[in-house]
Image: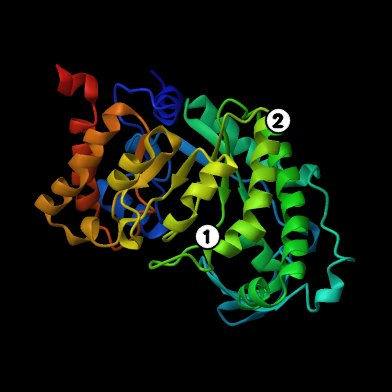
Amino acid sequence: MTSREWVMKALNFQPPDRIPRFDNFWGEFIENWRKQKGFGQNVDIRDYYGIDLSVHVADETFFPSSKRVIKKEGVYEILEDGWGRTVKTREGSYFSQTIATVLKSKSALDGLEFEPADMDVRYQNFLERVKEDKQKQRAVFCKIGGPFHRSSFIRGEAEFLMDLVSDKSFAKALVEKVTDHRISIGLESLRRGNLYDTGVWIYDDMGSNDAPMFSPRTFEEIFLPVYKRMVNALKEAGARKVILHCDGNIVPFLDMLIEAGIDGINPVEPKAGMHILELKEKYGDKLSYIGGVDNAFVLPSGDRERIRNHVLPILEAGKDGGIVIGTHSIGPDIAVGNYDFYHSLVCRYGNYAKTAG
């Protein structure tokens, strides 16, 4: 079987002959891995560890033609990032500080126009990455940002969270406009990448480690209708699966996400109270899981027995389908040897054909 076949069997709740794997690796981890293994730049860490799934994103920003560096201040850059934000960032850093947003007043929303989803420039690098991973027979999905996260880019996160409470009519109008653009990007990505037989991941971080960032009532009132509309549009176009990537604890939203048509969730973080075995027991074949392994405490600990006791039950549950094993991400706090040990468990006990024999 191919990686794509393993992944889709699992997502369809069909018993695979081995559990599929998905991890993202930080640059610092990859650098440590290359040094310790003696590999050059020509060796792909995903090939080495047998990663079966990939998610690729086009330039989905609202204003791609506006991207520019405004000025440099030592190791920092002030730039327009394409999301309608002016941000301060450091070279090589993933995170940035938002200085200003394009939606400075609520009254400006009606006049706000996003650049078209069908601009060719959005898809050049995207198509190259999709082609490469299809040739490796991975399960390749496209990505779009979700209505909460991308609306917060336009408005500012703190301001938008306050809008959700104090001005729901404005928040709904903003979310609707953002969702229209998200749908257009998703449909165009599906078409250009010919990714209908896999589908779309929606990235929409709505949770902290303890609870969602807003109430279930707010989700039901403002976000559930647009999630239904978005998932329906993607599936009507032919997408087989729509997966939600959302960090943190979103347990109070899960029933509504299933109602909206979401097929699976990632990364299922144990540190945030998202326990894959409990969720699988509760929801059965209503929801699949990509993730479930603790990258915050268990893998960094280096305690081999602790790692084994954490991972083996997930591998056992994966025999029935519904699980693609992995973590949120693999960073430099996880030693290469610790990841190698985890990977050896996946290879040994997640090869169901072999263990059955």
Q: Is residue 314 above or below residue 274?
A: above
Q: Is residue 33 above or below residue 97?
A: above
Residue 288's disc number: none
Tell which circle, 2 or 1, labels the residue nearer the N-terminal end: 1
Mark 1 is surrounded, within 10 Å at the Cα level, by few (under 14), some (14 to 19) or many (20 or more) other residues, namely: many
**Image location (x, y in percent) of residue 351:** 23, 26
Name the foreground residue: 70 vs 13: 13
Answer with the quarter of the image where residue 41 lies: top left
State the residue position of label 2.
237
Residue 205's disc number: 1
**Image location (x, y in percent) of residue 215:** 53, 66
Residue found at x 62% / y 28%: 196
Q: Is residue 297 left or right of residue 125?
A: left
**Image location (x, y in percent) of residue 335:** 24, 57
Q: Is residue 306 above or below residue 143?
A: below
Answer with the quarter of the image where residue 247 lies: bottom left
